[in-house]
Image: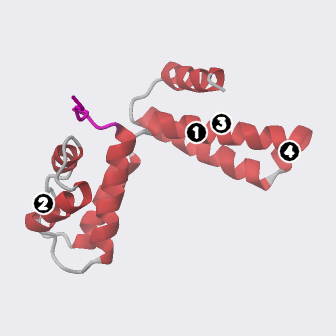
């Protein structure tokens, strides 16, 4: 028997939130945000399938009375930015390391490395602000490096 998963990971939920925000911003952005719109779009994005549908509905409870669809989209994007921080940090840190290895001894002069390093640093700060510990972030990076 093929069972569906009962939970959705943060990366999946983040993608759904961004997808919903994109739709709200693109379709009638100046119209008022209604609960009906939220429910309809959530069903469309997930095809009504759980656990995605339930997770998206739970995460997007209409909490901004009087907001336009574009304003609500901004709230959803801000919420999405707080998800999956450890994995996003690890990926950015790995990207920075790979660019540094390709660039060689003068890696700090490579603009690609500087940009990747800034991305990793920004995600580190967001993750720390969200309550992730230094040990947790370092352990996740170490585990990813071992998997290479």
Report x, y in % for residue 21. Answer: 31, 63
Residue name at image x 16 percent, y 44 percent: 54
**On the rendered structure, is 92 left or right of 9?**
right
Magenta span covers which residues? Answer: 1-9
Mark 1 vs mark 4: which is more N-terminal?
A: 1
Residue name at image x 85 percent, y 44 percent: 103
Mark 2 vs mark 1: which is more N-terminal?
A: 2
Looking at the picture, tell me which residue is in the foreground, 81 or 19.
19
Name the residue carrying label 3. 94
Mark 2 vs mark 4: which is more N-terminal?
A: 2
Looking at the picture, tell me which residue is in the foreground, 98 or 126.
98
Give the spatial CA distance, label 1 vs label 4: 18 Å
**Of the two numbered discs 2 and 4 in the rendering, the one whose residue sits closer to the viewer:** 2
Is residue 79 depicted above or below 19 in this figure? above
* Numbered tag placed on residue 103 in the rendering: 4
Q: Secondary structure at mark 1?
A: helix
Name the residue carrying label 1. 91
Is residue 11 visible to us here? yes
Few, some or many C-alpha atoms within 10 Å of disc 2 (few <14, some 14-19, many ≥20)? some
Give the spatial CA distance, label 2 vs label 1: 33 Å
Give the spatial CA distance, label 2 vs label 4: 49 Å
* Numbered tag placed on residue 39 in the rendering: 2
Q: Residue furthest right?
A: 105
Q: Are marks 1 and 3 in contact (CB under 8 Å)?
A: yes
Report x, y in % for residue 83. Answer: 38, 42
Q: Secondary structure at mark 4?
A: helix
Residue name at image x 51 percent, y 40 percent: 88
Q: Are marks 2 and 3 in contact (CB under 8 Å)?
A: no
Q: Secondary structure at mark 3?
A: helix
Is residue 82 depicted above or below 132 in this figure? below
């Amino acid at each position: 028997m093929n069972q569906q998963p009962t939970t959705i990971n943060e990366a999946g939920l983040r993608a759904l939130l961004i997808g919903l925000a994109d739709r709200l911003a693109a379709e009638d952005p100046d119209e008022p945000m209604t609960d009906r719109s939220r429910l309809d779009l959530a069903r469309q994005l997930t095809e009504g399938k759980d656990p995605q549908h339930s997770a998206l509905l739970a995460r997007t409870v209409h909490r901004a009375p009087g907001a336009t669809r574009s304003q609500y989209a901004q709230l959803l994007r801000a919420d999405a930015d707080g998800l999956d921080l450890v994995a996003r940090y690890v990926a950015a840190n790995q990207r920075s390391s790979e660019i540094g290895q390709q660039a060689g001894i003068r890696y700090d002069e490579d603009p690609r490395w500087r940009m990747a390093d800034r991305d990793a640093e920004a995600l580190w700060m967001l993750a720390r602000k969200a309550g992730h510990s230094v040990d947790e972030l370092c352990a996740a990076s170490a585990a990813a490096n071992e998997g290479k």
